[in-house]
Amino acid sequence: MLLEAQKIRADFPILKRQIGGKPLVYLDNAASSQKPQSVLLTMNAFYQVSYANIHRGVYTIAEEATELYEKARETVANFLNTKTHREIIFTRGTTEAINLVRFSWGRKNVQSGDEILLTEMEHHSNLVPWQLLAQEKGAKLKFIPFDSQGKLVLDQLDSLLTDKTKLVAMNFVSNTFGTINPVEKVIAKAHAKGIPVLLDAAQAVPHLTVDVQKLDCDFLAFSSHKMLGPTGIGVLYAKEKILEAMDPFLGGGEMIKEVHWDHSTWNDLPGKFEAGTQSIAEAVGLKAAIDYLKTIGLEKIHDHEQALARYTMEQFSEMKELTFYGPPPKDRCGLVAFNLQGIHPHDVAAVLDRSGICVRAGHHCTQPLHRKLGLEASVRASYYLYNTKEEVDLLIDALKETTRFFKK
Ligand SMILES: Cc1ncc(COP(=O)(O)O)c(C=O)c1O
Protein backbone atom coordinates (compact mmCIF):
# COMPACT_ATOMS: atom_id res chain seq x y z
CA MET A 1 0.00 0.00 0.00
CA LEU A 2 1.35 3.41 -0.92
CA LEU A 3 1.27 6.24 1.58
CA GLU A 4 -0.46 9.52 0.93
CA ALA A 5 2.90 11.01 0.09
CA GLN A 6 1.48 14.34 -1.09
CA LYS A 7 -0.09 14.93 2.32
CA ILE A 8 3.12 13.89 4.07
CA ARG A 9 5.21 16.17 1.81
CA ALA A 10 3.33 19.20 3.12
CA ASP A 11 4.95 18.53 6.53
CA PHE A 12 8.48 18.96 5.11
CA PRO A 13 9.30 22.62 4.37
CA ILE A 14 12.40 21.86 2.27
CA LEU A 15 10.35 19.84 -0.22
CA LYS A 16 8.74 23.07 -1.42
CA ARG A 17 12.14 24.20 -2.67
CA GLN A 18 13.06 24.52 -6.30
CA ILE A 19 16.48 23.91 -7.84
CA GLY A 20 17.05 25.94 -11.01
CA GLY A 21 13.29 26.38 -11.40
CA LYS A 22 12.57 22.67 -10.99
CA PRO A 23 11.03 21.01 -7.92
CA LEU A 24 13.50 19.44 -5.53
CA VAL A 25 13.48 15.64 -5.91
CA TYR A 26 15.29 14.36 -2.85
CA LEU A 27 16.43 10.76 -3.37
CA ASP A 28 19.42 10.62 -0.99
CA ASN A 29 17.64 9.47 2.14
CA ALA A 30 20.10 6.69 2.94
CA ALA A 31 22.71 9.42 3.42
CA SER A 32 20.43 11.64 5.48
CA SER A 33 16.71 12.38 5.64
CA GLN A 34 14.83 15.69 5.56
CA LYS A 35 13.07 17.02 8.68
CA PRO A 36 9.36 17.58 9.25
CA GLN A 37 8.05 20.86 10.60
CA SER A 38 7.19 19.16 13.92
CA VAL A 39 10.87 18.35 14.56
CA LEU A 40 11.99 21.88 13.62
CA LEU A 41 9.29 23.55 15.74
CA THR A 42 9.89 21.26 18.72
CA MET A 43 13.62 22.05 18.77
CA ASN A 44 12.96 25.74 18.28
CA ALA A 45 10.41 25.80 21.10
CA PHE A 46 12.83 23.95 23.36
CA TYR A 47 15.49 26.63 22.79
CA GLN A 48 12.95 29.43 23.20
CA VAL A 49 11.21 28.10 26.31
CA SER A 50 13.07 25.44 28.31
CA TYR A 51 16.74 25.46 27.30
CA ALA A 52 19.32 24.84 30.03
CA ASN A 53 21.96 22.24 30.79
CA ILE A 54 20.62 18.97 32.17
CA HIS A 55 21.07 16.84 35.31
CA ARG A 56 22.73 19.77 37.12
CA GLY A 57 20.49 22.73 37.81
CA VAL A 58 17.80 22.80 40.46
CA TYR A 59 15.96 25.68 38.83
CA THR A 60 12.77 25.29 36.81
CA ILE A 61 14.04 25.36 33.23
CA ALA A 62 16.96 23.03 34.06
CA GLU A 63 14.44 20.58 35.46
CA GLU A 64 12.25 20.98 32.38
CA ALA A 65 15.22 20.38 30.08
CA THR A 66 16.28 17.30 32.06
CA GLU A 67 12.75 15.95 31.91
CA LEU A 68 12.54 16.47 28.14
CA TYR A 69 15.93 14.82 27.59
CA GLU A 70 14.99 11.81 29.69
CA LYS A 71 11.57 11.64 28.02
CA ALA A 72 13.44 11.35 24.72
CA ARG A 73 15.37 8.39 26.12
CA GLU A 74 12.11 6.75 27.23
CA THR A 75 10.63 7.31 23.76
CA VAL A 76 13.64 5.64 22.13
CA ALA A 77 13.45 2.77 24.66
CA ASN A 78 9.75 2.21 23.86
CA PHE A 79 10.39 2.50 20.14
CA LEU A 80 12.95 -0.34 20.35
CA ASN A 81 11.08 -2.25 23.07
CA THR A 82 14.09 -2.38 25.42
CA LYS A 83 13.77 -3.96 28.88
CA THR A 84 14.71 -0.68 30.54
CA HIS A 85 15.56 2.87 29.49
CA ARG A 86 18.99 2.35 31.11
CA GLU A 87 19.91 0.35 28.01
CA ILE A 88 19.73 3.48 25.81
CA ILE A 89 22.96 5.47 25.52
CA PHE A 90 22.89 8.68 23.51
CA THR A 91 25.89 9.09 21.22
CA ARG A 92 26.66 11.42 18.30
CA GLY A 93 25.55 8.77 15.82
CA THR A 94 26.03 5.22 14.59
CA THR A 95 29.76 5.68 14.07
CA GLU A 96 30.35 6.87 17.62
CA ALA A 97 28.10 4.13 19.03
CA ILE A 98 30.13 1.42 17.28
CA ASN A 99 33.39 3.02 18.40
CA LEU A 100 32.05 3.13 21.96
CA VAL A 101 31.64 -0.66 21.79
CA ARG A 102 35.10 -0.99 20.26
CA PHE A 103 36.74 0.92 23.13
CA SER A 104 34.60 0.00 26.13
CA TRP A 105 33.75 -3.61 25.31
CA GLY A 106 36.29 -4.58 22.64
CA ARG A 107 39.45 -3.59 24.49
CA LYS A 108 38.38 -5.66 27.49
CA ASN A 109 37.06 -8.71 25.68
CA VAL A 110 39.14 -9.14 22.51
CA GLN A 111 42.67 -10.52 22.83
CA SER A 112 45.46 -11.67 20.55
CA GLY A 113 44.37 -14.53 18.28
CA ASP A 114 40.64 -13.81 18.75
CA GLU A 115 38.32 -13.32 15.79
CA ILE A 116 35.58 -10.81 14.94
CA LEU A 117 33.07 -11.85 12.31
CA LEU A 118 31.70 -9.15 9.96
CA THR A 119 30.02 -9.33 6.55
CA GLU A 120 31.42 -8.29 3.19
CA MET A 121 28.78 -5.57 2.93
CA GLU A 122 29.66 -3.47 5.98
CA HIS A 123 29.63 0.30 5.90
CA HIS A 124 33.13 1.59 6.76
CA SER A 125 31.68 2.61 10.15
CA ASN A 126 31.28 -1.04 11.05
CA LEU A 127 34.55 -2.16 9.50
CA VAL A 128 37.29 0.38 10.26
CA PRO A 129 36.71 0.40 14.08
CA TRP A 130 37.15 -3.38 14.11
CA GLN A 131 40.26 -3.15 11.91
CA LEU A 132 41.72 -0.72 14.46
CA LEU A 133 40.84 -3.01 17.37
CA ALA A 134 42.19 -6.06 15.54
CA GLN A 135 45.47 -4.22 14.82
CA GLU A 136 45.75 -3.10 18.44
CA LYS A 137 45.07 -6.56 19.87
CA GLY A 138 46.48 -8.88 17.22
CA ALA A 139 42.99 -10.21 16.48
CA LYS A 140 41.65 -11.32 13.09
CA LEU A 141 38.64 -10.19 11.06
CA LYS A 142 36.57 -12.72 9.14
CA PHE A 143 33.73 -12.05 6.71
CA ILE A 144 30.41 -13.62 5.78
CA PRO A 145 30.40 -13.38 1.96
CA PHE A 146 27.59 -12.05 -0.25
CA ASP A 147 26.35 -13.64 -3.49
CA SER A 148 25.58 -12.19 -6.93
CA GLN A 149 22.20 -10.91 -5.66
CA GLY A 150 23.79 -9.04 -2.76
CA LYS A 151 22.48 -11.55 -0.22
CA LEU A 152 24.56 -13.07 2.55
CA VAL A 153 25.74 -16.64 2.02
CA LEU A 154 25.15 -18.37 5.34
CA ASP A 155 26.23 -21.92 4.32
CA GLN A 156 29.62 -21.41 5.93
CA LEU A 157 28.33 -19.64 9.04
CA ASP A 158 28.85 -22.63 11.34
CA SER A 159 32.52 -22.86 10.40
CA LEU A 160 33.00 -19.08 10.45
CA LEU A 161 31.82 -18.99 14.08
CA THR A 162 34.73 -20.60 15.90
CA ASP A 163 35.68 -20.84 19.55
CA LYS A 164 37.94 -17.84 18.91
CA THR A 165 35.06 -15.63 17.67
CA LYS A 166 34.44 -12.91 20.26
CA LEU A 167 31.88 -10.81 18.39
CA VAL A 168 29.67 -10.75 15.31
CA ALA A 169 29.17 -7.20 14.01
CA MET A 170 26.91 -6.82 10.98
CA ASN A 171 24.61 -4.44 9.20
CA PHE A 172 20.87 -5.06 9.52
CA VAL A 173 20.10 -3.42 6.16
CA SER A 174 22.82 -2.82 3.57
CA ASN A 175 23.23 0.83 2.62
CA THR A 176 24.39 -0.18 -0.90
CA PHE A 177 22.35 -3.27 -1.84
CA GLY A 178 19.35 -2.43 0.32
CA THR A 179 19.32 -6.07 1.46
CA ILE A 180 17.43 -6.80 4.67
CA ASN A 181 19.81 -9.28 6.21
CA PRO A 182 18.64 -12.42 8.07
CA VAL A 183 19.94 -11.09 11.39
CA GLU A 184 17.71 -13.35 13.51
CA LYS A 185 19.34 -16.43 11.96
CA VAL A 186 22.85 -15.11 12.58
CA ILE A 187 22.00 -14.09 16.15
CA ALA A 188 20.57 -17.54 16.94
CA LYS A 189 23.68 -19.29 15.57
CA ALA A 190 26.08 -16.91 17.33
CA HIS A 191 24.24 -17.17 20.64
CA ALA A 192 24.27 -20.98 20.42
CA LYS A 193 28.06 -20.59 20.71
CA GLY A 194 27.86 -17.85 23.36
CA ILE A 195 28.97 -15.08 20.96
CA PRO A 196 27.41 -11.58 21.26
CA VAL A 197 26.07 -9.77 18.19
CA LEU A 198 26.22 -6.08 17.32
CA LEU A 199 23.76 -4.80 14.71
CA ASP A 200 24.56 -1.70 12.68
CA ALA A 201 20.94 -0.65 12.29
CA ALA A 202 21.58 2.76 10.68
CA GLN A 203 19.49 1.77 7.64
CA ALA A 204 17.01 -0.40 9.57
CA VAL A 205 15.61 1.64 12.46
CA PRO A 206 14.37 4.47 10.16
CA HIS A 207 12.43 2.01 7.97
CA LEU A 208 11.51 -1.18 9.86
CA THR A 209 9.97 -2.08 13.19
CA VAL A 210 12.92 -3.07 15.35
CA ASP A 211 12.25 -4.95 18.58
CA VAL A 212 15.52 -5.57 20.41
CA GLN A 213 14.02 -8.09 22.83
CA LYS A 214 12.57 -10.14 19.99
CA LEU A 215 15.83 -9.91 18.02
CA ASP A 216 17.84 -10.64 21.16
CA CYS A 217 20.79 -8.65 19.75
CA ASP A 218 23.41 -7.59 22.29
CA PHE A 219 24.26 -4.20 20.78
CA LEU A 220 22.42 -2.05 18.24
CA ALA A 221 23.45 1.30 16.79
CA PHE A 222 21.65 3.95 14.72
CA SER A 223 21.58 7.67 13.86
CA SER A 224 18.80 10.20 14.30
CA HIS A 225 19.55 12.15 11.10
CA LYS A 226 18.51 9.24 8.86
CA MET A 227 15.08 9.00 10.55
CA LEU A 228 13.76 12.58 10.26
CA GLY A 229 15.66 13.74 13.36
CA PRO A 230 18.54 16.19 13.74
CA THR A 231 22.24 15.49 13.21
CA GLY A 232 24.56 15.18 16.20
CA ILE A 233 22.65 12.46 18.02
CA GLY A 234 22.41 8.71 17.73
CA VAL A 235 21.85 5.72 19.93
CA LEU A 236 23.69 2.74 21.27
CA TYR A 237 21.39 0.07 22.66
CA ALA A 238 23.08 -2.68 24.68
CA LYS A 239 21.82 -5.24 27.16
CA GLU A 240 22.02 -3.87 30.69
CA LYS A 241 24.25 -6.67 31.99
CA ILE A 242 26.78 -6.05 29.22
CA LEU A 243 26.78 -2.27 29.81
CA GLU A 244 27.29 -2.82 33.55
CA ALA A 245 30.40 -4.90 32.84
CA MET A 246 31.86 -2.45 30.31
CA ASP A 247 34.44 0.21 31.13
CA PRO A 248 33.54 3.87 30.53
CA PHE A 249 34.18 5.31 27.07
CA LEU A 250 34.91 9.03 27.53
CA GLY A 251 35.92 10.40 30.90
CA GLY A 252 34.68 13.71 32.30
CA GLY A 253 31.68 15.31 33.91
CA GLU A 254 28.37 13.46 34.34
CA MET A 255 29.81 9.97 33.93
CA ILE A 256 31.20 9.88 37.49
CA LYS A 257 29.79 9.23 40.94
CA GLU A 258 32.77 10.26 43.09
CA VAL A 259 36.04 11.83 42.00
CA HIS A 260 39.25 11.81 44.07
CA TRP A 261 42.71 13.05 43.13
CA ASP A 262 43.82 9.58 42.10
CA HIS A 263 40.68 7.69 41.13
CA SER A 264 36.96 7.97 40.41
CA THR A 265 33.86 5.83 40.54
CA TRP A 266 31.29 5.64 37.77
CA ASN A 267 27.77 6.91 37.48
CA ASP A 268 24.89 4.45 37.14
CA LEU A 269 23.63 3.58 33.67
CA PRO A 270 23.15 5.28 31.32
CA GLY A 271 25.12 8.26 32.73
CA LYS A 272 28.33 6.19 32.88
CA PHE A 273 28.52 6.41 29.08
CA GLU A 274 27.35 10.01 28.62
CA ALA A 275 30.34 12.17 29.58
CA GLY A 276 30.11 15.94 29.22
CA THR A 277 27.24 18.08 27.98
CA GLN A 278 25.06 16.06 25.66
CA SER A 279 23.17 16.99 22.48
CA ILE A 280 20.14 18.06 24.48
CA ALA A 281 17.99 19.83 21.87
CA GLU A 282 18.88 17.07 19.42
CA ALA A 283 17.51 14.43 21.80
CA VAL A 284 14.30 16.46 22.03
CA GLY A 285 14.24 16.62 18.22
CA LEU A 286 14.80 12.87 17.93
CA LYS A 287 11.79 12.29 20.15
CA ALA A 288 9.67 14.49 17.87
CA ALA A 289 10.93 12.50 14.85
CA ILE A 290 9.98 9.18 16.46
CA ASP A 291 6.55 10.60 17.38
CA TYR A 292 6.08 11.61 13.74
CA LEU A 293 7.19 8.20 12.39
CA LYS A 294 4.81 6.49 14.82
CA THR A 295 1.81 8.50 13.59
CA ILE A 296 2.47 7.23 10.04
CA GLY A 297 3.51 3.69 11.05
CA LEU A 298 6.73 1.91 10.14
CA GLU A 299 5.01 -0.99 8.36
CA LYS A 300 3.30 1.43 6.01
CA ILE A 301 6.52 3.36 5.50
CA HIS A 302 8.41 0.17 4.63
CA ASP A 303 5.68 -1.02 2.22
CA HIS A 304 5.67 2.38 0.53
CA GLU A 305 9.45 2.48 0.07
CA GLN A 306 9.59 -1.13 -1.08
CA ALA A 307 6.89 -0.39 -3.69
CA LEU A 308 8.98 2.54 -4.96
CA ALA A 309 12.08 0.29 -5.15
CA ARG A 310 10.07 -2.38 -6.99
CA TYR A 311 8.79 0.19 -9.50
CA THR A 312 12.31 1.58 -9.96
CA MET A 313 13.71 -1.88 -10.64
CA GLU A 314 10.94 -2.65 -13.14
CA GLN A 315 11.78 0.54 -15.03
CA PHE A 316 15.53 -0.11 -14.75
CA SER A 317 15.08 -3.63 -16.21
CA GLU A 318 13.95 -2.07 -19.47
CA MET A 319 17.02 0.16 -19.78
CA LYS A 320 19.71 -1.93 -21.44
CA GLU A 321 22.50 0.52 -20.66
CA LEU A 322 21.75 0.38 -16.93
CA THR A 323 22.99 -2.20 -14.41
CA PHE A 324 21.55 -2.32 -10.91
CA TYR A 325 22.61 -4.24 -7.86
CA GLY A 326 21.10 -6.09 -4.94
CA PRO A 327 18.32 -8.58 -4.22
CA PRO A 328 14.70 -8.77 -5.47
CA PRO A 329 12.37 -6.09 -4.07
CA LYS A 330 10.81 -8.37 -1.43
CA ASP A 331 14.22 -8.77 0.25
CA ARG A 332 15.15 -5.10 0.35
CA CYS A 333 14.40 -1.69 1.74
CA GLY A 334 13.74 1.31 -0.49
CA LEU A 335 17.07 1.97 -2.12
CA VAL A 336 18.60 0.98 -5.46
CA ALA A 337 22.26 1.34 -6.50
CA PHE A 338 23.08 1.29 -10.20
CA ASN A 339 25.45 2.33 -12.97
CA LEU A 340 24.90 3.71 -16.46
CA GLN A 341 27.24 2.03 -18.94
CA GLY A 342 30.29 4.14 -19.75
CA ILE A 343 29.24 7.15 -17.64
CA HIS A 344 30.95 7.89 -14.34
CA PRO A 345 28.52 7.97 -11.37
CA HIS A 346 29.65 11.51 -10.50
CA ASP A 347 28.73 12.66 -14.01
CA VAL A 348 25.33 10.96 -13.70
CA ALA A 349 24.68 12.70 -10.36
CA ALA A 350 25.84 16.07 -11.71
CA VAL A 351 23.49 15.82 -14.70
CA LEU A 352 20.58 14.73 -12.48
CA ASP A 353 21.19 17.76 -10.28
CA ARG A 354 20.31 19.94 -13.27
CA SER A 355 16.83 18.42 -13.04
CA GLY A 356 16.70 19.09 -9.28
CA ILE A 357 17.26 15.38 -8.52
CA CYS A 358 19.54 14.55 -5.58
CA VAL A 359 21.18 11.12 -5.66
CA ARG A 360 24.36 9.79 -4.12
CA ALA A 361 27.35 8.97 -6.33
CA GLY A 362 30.49 7.28 -5.06
CA HIS A 363 31.34 4.23 -2.98
CA HIS A 364 28.71 4.98 -0.28
CA CYS A 365 31.33 4.07 2.38
CA THR A 366 31.45 0.49 1.10
CA GLN A 367 34.71 0.41 -0.87
CA PRO A 368 35.41 -3.32 -0.34
CA LEU A 369 31.87 -4.19 -1.52
CA HIS A 370 32.34 -2.15 -4.70
CA ARG A 371 35.79 -3.67 -5.27
CA LYS A 372 34.31 -7.18 -5.06
CA LEU A 373 31.80 -6.16 -7.77
CA GLY A 374 34.68 -4.85 -9.89
CA LEU A 375 33.42 -1.29 -9.47
CA GLU A 376 34.88 1.92 -8.18
CA ALA A 377 31.56 3.56 -7.54
CA SER A 378 27.83 3.54 -8.21
CA VAL A 379 24.82 5.86 -8.17
CA ARG A 380 22.23 5.33 -5.43
CA ALA A 381 18.61 6.43 -5.27
CA SER A 382 17.17 5.98 -1.79
CA TYR A 383 13.56 6.62 -0.80
CA TYR A 384 11.63 7.61 2.27
CA LEU A 385 8.03 8.18 3.24
CA TYR A 386 7.68 11.47 1.31
CA ASN A 387 8.89 10.18 -2.07
CA THR A 388 6.40 9.52 -4.86
CA LYS A 389 6.05 7.38 -7.98
CA GLU A 390 6.13 10.64 -9.97
CA GLU A 391 9.58 11.36 -8.57
CA VAL A 392 10.76 7.92 -9.70
CA ASP A 393 9.41 8.77 -13.18
CA LEU A 394 11.40 12.02 -13.13
CA LEU A 395 14.51 10.03 -12.20
CA ILE A 396 13.95 7.52 -15.02
CA ASP A 397 13.35 10.30 -17.59
CA ALA A 398 16.45 12.16 -16.43
CA LEU A 399 18.55 8.98 -16.65
CA LYS A 400 17.34 8.33 -20.20
CA GLU A 401 18.21 11.92 -21.05
CA THR A 402 21.66 11.48 -19.44
CA THR A 403 22.35 8.43 -21.60
CA ARG A 404 21.29 10.31 -24.75
CA PHE A 405 23.43 13.30 -23.76
CA PHE A 406 26.60 11.26 -23.21
CA LYS A 407 26.08 9.18 -26.35
CA LYS A 408 25.99 12.22 -28.62
C1 LIG B 1 24.80 1.05 7.31
C2 LIG B 1 25.39 2.31 7.87
N1 LIG B 1 26.16 2.25 8.97
C3 LIG B 1 26.70 3.34 9.52
C4 LIG B 1 26.51 4.58 8.98
C5 LIG B 1 27.16 5.77 9.62
O1 LIG B 1 26.22 6.61 10.18
P1 LIG B 1 26.68 8.02 10.81
O2 LIG B 1 27.48 8.70 9.75
O3 LIG B 1 25.38 8.71 11.11
O4 LIG B 1 27.48 7.71 12.03
C6 LIG B 1 25.74 4.71 7.83
C7 LIG B 1 25.56 6.02 7.19
O5 LIG B 1 25.52 6.16 5.98
C8 LIG B 1 25.16 3.54 7.26
O6 LIG B 1 24.43 3.60 6.16
Image (cartoon, helix red, strand yellow):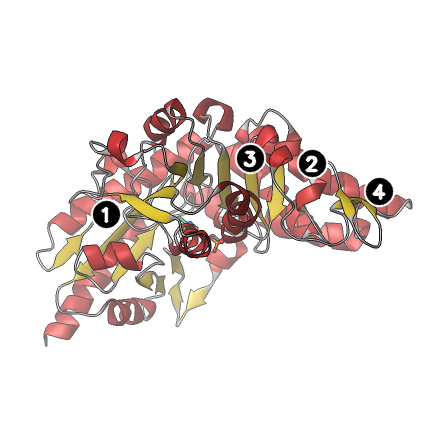
Instruction: Please name the residue that numbered disc 1 is placed on.
Output: 312
Asked whether 406 or 270 is in front, the reply is 270
Position above or below: 276 against 164: below
Alpha carbons under labels 4 and 2: distance apart? 19 Å
Quarter holding the N terminus is: top left
Residue most extreme to the bottom: 408
Q: Which of marks 3 and 4 is nearer the N terminus?
A: 4
Q: How many other residues sit within 10 Å of disc 1, few (<14), some (14-19) or many (≥20)? A: many
Crowding near the residue tagged with mark 3, few <14, some 14–19, many ≥20 C-alpha atoms within 10 Å? many
Q: Is mark 2 within 8 Å of ligand 1?
A: no
The mark found on residue 238 in the picture is: 3
- Mark 2, residue position: 269
Q: Which of marks 4 and 2 is in front?
A: 2
Q: Does the residue labelled 3 lie within 8 Å of ligand 1?
A: no
Q: Which of marks 1 and 3 is nearer the N terminus?
A: 3
Kindly state the secondary structure of the residue where label 3 is placed: strand
Camera-nearest label, 2 or 1: 2
CA gap, disc 1 and disc 4: 49 Å
Q: What residue type is labelled 1?
A: Thr
**First in sequence: mark 4 vs mark 2:** 4
Location of residue 47 (image quadrant): bottom right
Q: Quadrant of the C terminus?
A: bottom left
Q: Name the residue under label 4.
A: 63
Query: As drawn, is 70 to the left or to the right of 226?
Result: right
Residue 309 appears in which quarter of the rendering?
Answer: top left
The amino acid at mark 4 is Glu
Give x and y (percent) for residue 282.
Answer: 64, 51
